[in-house]
Image (cartoon, grey):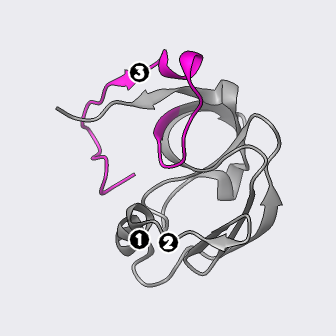
Amino acid sequence: MEPTLRVQERYVVDKVVYKESVPQRWDIVLLEFEYSGENIRRFSRIVGLPNESIHLKHGVIVINGKVEDSPRFAERQKFGAKGRGFGVLEPITLNEGEYFVLGDNYVDGLDSRYFGPVRAKSLVGKLLPEE
């Protein structure tokens, strides 16, 4: 998740927020799930929401047929993509209760491009902003 989050830093996660509200696009969340026989805990950014269609193509995110041009995404893309983009992911449609997540460091990220959509039960909580 660099440059947003630094290795060896400590962060505070709100583990109650998603019991009272639903995750939003661009939330940074702590995930916990099993992948390739290992228990994984990592931070990722929510990009796709339930029932949306997601398509990645050479550094561009397309959500429900529209190119995502959020300044928040554009800034992250500059660091992670390093001009190479993050490849191609054929369009997928998320089911109810599924989220598509990306790390901010797209080149080295282990995210939904590799392990697929994450279920709501895998969302441990939302990263709280630094004060």
Q: Quadrant of residue 20?
A: top right
Range covered by the magenta-colored residues: 1-30
Q: Is residue 22 above or below residue 76?
A: above
Report how far apart the C-alphas of labels 3 and 1 lie in the structure. Answer: 26 Å
Residue lying at 41% horizontally and 71% vertically, measured from the top left: 74
> Badge 1: how crowded within 10 Å, few (<14), some, or many (20+)?
few
Mark 1 residue element: helix
The residue indicated by pointer 1 is 74
Please state the total of marks drawn on the protein image.
3
Report how far apart the C-alphas of labels 1 and 2 lie in the structure. Answer: 7 Å
Q: Name the amino acid type tagged 1.
A: Ala
Q: Tell which circle, 3 or 2, labels the residue nearer the N-terminal end.
A: 3
Residue sitting nearer the eye, 7 or 97: 97
Q: Position of residue 117 (x, y in %)?
A: 72, 46
Mark 3 residue element: strand
Farthest bottom residue? 83
Cβ atoms at labels 3 and 2 below 8 Å apart: no
Mostly what secondary structure, the magenta segment?
loop
Q: Quadrant of residue 34?
A: top right
> Residue 2 colored magenta?
yes
The residue indicated by pointer 2 is 69
Residue lying at 43% horizontally and 84% vertically, measured from the top left: 83
Q: Position of residue 26 (x, y in %)?
A: 48, 49
Mark 2 residue element: loop
Cβ atoms at labels 1 and 2 below 8 Å apart: yes
The residue indicated by pointer 3 is 14
Farthest left residue? 131
Q: Tell which circle, 3 or 1, labels the residue nearer the N-terminal end.
A: 3
Residue sitting nearer the eye, 33 or 47: 47
